Amino acid sequence: MKTKRQTLLLLLVLTLCAQSLHAISIPPKFDGFVYGNRPAFDPDAIIIEAFMDPVCPDSRDSWRPLKRALQHYGSRLLLIVHPFPLPYHDNAFVTSRALHIVDKLNASATLSMLELFFEQQEQLYNQPTHNLSRAAVVDEVVKLVVNVVGNSLATSVRSGFNDRKTDLATRVSFKYGCSRGVYGTPFFFVNGFVLPDAGDAIDYKGWRKIIDPLVGVHKHKEENYHFFL
């Protein structure tokens, strides 16, 4: 059962989503970060889209079992991670923006950055940063980013937070999630269809239960195809 505060926060997200859709425009590229060195779309793969907030505990808890599933199924799965900064997490936008900055500098490091945010998440919660200025929070985030991309890119990382393009990219991520009906994190779609229990982490057994039947369907189709050749 949701508390009164949680209900009000959920209504806030839904209101912001509704407002953002009035101003949405088509971005020049599809939103999201692809897991692994793969093309953004593979017609033969089962596509998982994960909407995550870097400072959301449930997003953090969902990441490890999802990675385990990706390792188990290999090329049969394709994961696209969409940052979705929840407005009641004070530092969700700045950390989501950092993902876009890293992706621009070194796309292969983007999801490693997300993992580091998950590992260091508690220092970016609302309470520990309550008395910090926005500039001070950005400084802390820059330090974390440099740990991933290297000191040689420190200046580029810092300037990224003054780049209007990274601000707009982060807004597009939020608006894209709203356009898909996302209202919390983690939020998952498989082959375009939303999974139930949005906002809750899915464990490894849960992913096996979801994916195994789909892999079986793919295998059956392949067998039928070879039979008719």
Image (spheres, helix red, strand yellow):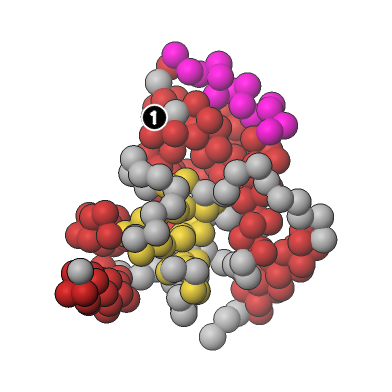
Task: Reply yes or no: does residue 60 show up in magenta.
Answer: no
Query: What residue appears at the point 77 percent right and 67 percent down from the top-left corner?
Result: 18
Query: What residue appears at the point 49 percent right and 74 percent down from the top-left corner?
Result: 193
**In the image as oriented, which residue stretches furthest toward the bottom?**
1
Query: What residue appears at the point 64 percent right and 35 percent down from the top-left corner?
Result: 166
Is residue 130 visible in this depiction of the protein?
Answer: no
Q: Main secondary structure of the magenta part?
A: helix
Which quadrant holds residue 165?
A: top right
Of 116 and 28, nearer the camera is: 28
Query: What residue appears at the point 23 percent right and 61 percent down from the top-left corner?
Result: 73
Q: In the image, is residue 135 above or below residue 200?
A: above
**x and y percentages locating residue 143 in the rendered image:** 48, 27
Residue type highlighted by circle 1: Val
Q: Quadrant of the C terminus?
A: bottom left
**In the image as oriented, which residue stretches furthest toward the top?**
152
**x and y percentages locating residue 145 in the rendered image:** 46, 30
Is residue 96 visible in this depiction of the protein?
Answer: yes
**In the image as oriented, which residue stretches furthest toward the front?**
229
Q: In the image, is residue 167 above or below residue 32?
A: above
Residue 51 vs residue 211: left or right?
Answer: right
Element assignment for label 1: helix
Q: In the image, is residue 219 above or below residue 99?
A: below
**x and y percentages locating residue 110 in the rendered image:** 44, 38
Q: Quadrant of the N terminus?
A: bottom right
Residue pointed to by mark 1 = 148
Question: Alpha-carbon neighbours of circle 1 within 10 Å: few (<14), some, or many (≥20)?
Answer: some
Which span is picked out in magenta? 152-165
How many marks do you count on the picture?
Answer: 1
**x and y percentages locating residue 20 in the rendered image:** 77, 59
Residue 84 vs residue 44: left or right?
Answer: right
